[in-house]
Image (cartoon, helix red, strand yellow):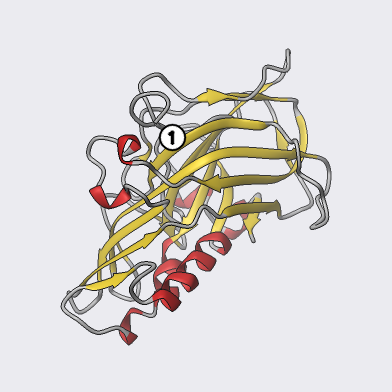
Amino acid sequence: MACCSSTLIGVTLRWSSLLAPLLLALGSCGPRGGTDVGNGANVTFDVRGYERKEPATKSLTLGSGDVVDELWIAVEQFQVRKGAECSDSDDETGEEPVAQGPFIAEVIEGGIVGGLPSGMLEPGAYCRVRLDLHELEKAEVPAGAPNELAGATVFMRGTRADGVPFTVTSKQSFEFRLDAKEDSFEVVDGRPFFVGIELGALVAALELDTLSGSTLIVDPENNNPQLQAFEKALREASRLFEDKDKDGNLTSSESGDDDELAVGK
């Protein structure tokens, strides 16, 4: 790790447990935000997890009876595309990151570790948020995080409805892309966002009932088809929301279908 310990993001973007809170910031030296654009808008991102309209706290018992105890995600950087509309053919080469990590989030309980870094954007319409996952080195794993995070980008631990424990470990440094639901969303000064990850969709993708054993392990060496389905669901189950009351928590009144600003692909 180039800096010290760990932490999470910028405009203030917040990962939410809406779909499952997840991001941690790395390092007591602090994350690096985007370029100062003068009289711009200071925004933040956080990452959290949730099931439907119920925010996750401590652990989350899903409607299926499965329990998610922890979900960790490491993010390399956040980028935001300016414009009233994005297309799949848009060239994002050279786009400046709003916040450069790595950042680490524990989506279920605390979001970004170490506080929310911030970055500056020009106020106006934006059509896409993009984040790249980061494979953590051992020295980058923050205090209190599981050892399984070393060498991984995502780690989940939980219990199947019948009491059988399971873990999921992804080492893929893949990209998330959340495109605006209504062509664009507005960025204004001081507007905080959550990236939410829907936990029910993640666990459903694992098809845990099809696996056997006293402990269920899903990683590159074990049950790889389930891992690939999980990684796909992670991208598609992400949503962008606004922290409307700016209290740092993703609530049911902020995480409904009508509150979605951008959806994952």
Whether residue 17 can be seen here:
no
Q: Is residue 214 above or below residue 159?
A: below
Residue at image coords 83%, 56%: 89
Q: On the image, numbered disc 1 is attached to which residue?
A: 248
Q: Position of residue 198 (x, y in %)?
A: 47, 61
Q: Position of residue 57 (x, y in %)?
A: 30, 50
Residue at image coords 43%, 35%: 248
Q: For residue 82, which quarter of the picture?
A: top right
Q: Position of residue 237 (x, y in %)?
A: 53, 62
- Left or right of 121? Residue 220 is left
Foreground of the two, 130 or 20: 130
Q: Is residue 232 above or below residue 97?
A: below
Which quarter of the figure is the N terminus placed in?
Answer: top left
Crowding near the residue tagged with mark 1, few <14, some 14–19, many ≥20 C-alpha atoms within 10 Å: some
Residue at image coords 42%, 62%: 199
Q: Amino acid at mark 1?
A: Gly
Q: Is residue 259 above or below residue 201?
A: above
Q: Give the structural element (helix, strand or loop) at label 1.
A: loop
Q: Residue furthest top?
A: 38
Which quarter of the figure is the C terminus placed in?
Answer: bottom right
Residue at image coords 50%, 61%: 234
Whether residue 89 can be seen here:
yes
Q: Position of residue 203 (x, y in %)?
A: 39, 70
Count numbered badges in the picture. 1
